[in-house]
Amino acid sequence: MNSDSTPSSEQSAPEHILGSSSAPNAQSIPSQASDLHWERETLQRLAMASLEEQKKQRWWRIFFRFAWLILVSAVLLLSFYKGGVTTSVSDPHTAVVQIKGEIASDSEASADSVIEALRSAFEEDSAKAVVLLINSPGGSPVQAGIINDEVKRLKALHNKPVYAVIEEMGASAAYYIAVSADKIYVDKASIVGSIGVLMDGFGFNGLMDKLGIERRLLTAGENKGFLDPFSAESKTQKAFALAMLEQIHQQFIAVVREGRGKRLHETPEIFSGLFWSGEEAIKLGLADELGSLDYVAREVIKAEDVVDYTHRDNVAERLAKRFGAEMGAGAVKTLLQQNLLLK
């Protein structure tokens, strides 16, 4: 009995051992399949995300191209608008030329821009008179003098009356231009006058002494560093500058006297650089009457339709100027970097 049972137990032992050793191999098959499935899903997700990103980039490219197309089309359309006359000029009308903001060579109120508009207004037969619509604190006496001379020349050439209408402000160089008109109209609260000339600056030499900074200025010509703000003030140079300002001031005074004539009630303060309200300016003879542009067109000129001849750069011109300035600045920077310019 014992001998029969021993082989039976020996035979069963290998089966138990085989069964226990084969169990881990059976479990590894679904685990590997699961890993492969996860990798496939991950790759699919990455591929889809990449496709979505490419689609977004493509749509953004289309959007920006479309936006640029609209911008370029708008610029091309606006480039046909030159600025200036805004309504028909076939009927009798009042011609207006605006002088607004600083009067300077690089502003909209430069002599070139204003004179271009003035010539168009004077040469138009249906324009019964020209109105200078002024709202400016002043600016360059040179630019103002050029405009003043041209107004008087065109007025005599075309035998056409000129009126100045001062809105908020007509001071300094702006008033220099206004006196070329036959009459000056103001609002009672307008700022009028400031018949004077100035030259301003700063002096830093005292501060430099306190900070221990030494100014090293080399010149060929004893006055080449004229009124240098980092050097001590020279009495000789100051006297020279004051004499030059006085000369320009006298030119201004002569123009005002010529334009206003006997209407001007001179006082010690009239040419001192002070300014007055429109109401007081009439009393001093700096202006003639109260009146707006509409009033002058309707009641004085008797041509109620107003046509604006003011020259304005169109969008294309402004972009071209800005682009040209940026290109010029870039070229100068490049030349400086290459030491091709004299410094």
Image: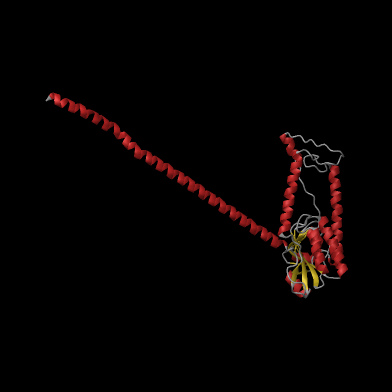
Asked if residue 256 shows in the view, the reply is no
**Where in the figure is residue 209, as x and y percent of width and height?**
74, 35
Location of residue 321 (image quadrant): bottom right
> Foreground residue, 220 or 60?
60
Position of 122 relative to 31 (above/below): below
Location of residue 74 (image quadrant): bottom right
**Where in the figure is residue 216, as x and y percent of width and height?**
79, 35
The residue at the point 74 percent across, 51 percent down is 324
The residue at the point 56 percent across, 50 percent down is 57
The image's colouring method is: secondary structure
Asked if residue 283 shows in the view, the reply is yes
Position of 24 relative to 285 (above/below): above
For the C terminus, the quadrant is top right
> Foreground residue, 59 or 186?
59
> Foreground residue, 117 or 137?
117
**Where in the figure is residue 245, as x and y percent of width and height?**
84, 51
Q: Is residue 289 left or right of residue 11?
A: right
Position of 284 relative to 23 (above/below): below
Q: How many marks?
A: 0
**Where in the figure is residue 303, as x and y percent of width and height?**
77, 74
Location of residue 262 (image quadrant): bottom right
The residue at the point 79 percent across, 61 percent down is 114
Q: Report the residue that reaches farthest toward the top.
A: 3
Position of 206 relative to 324 (above/below): above
> Foreground residue, 76 or 274?
76
For the N terminus, the quadrant is top left
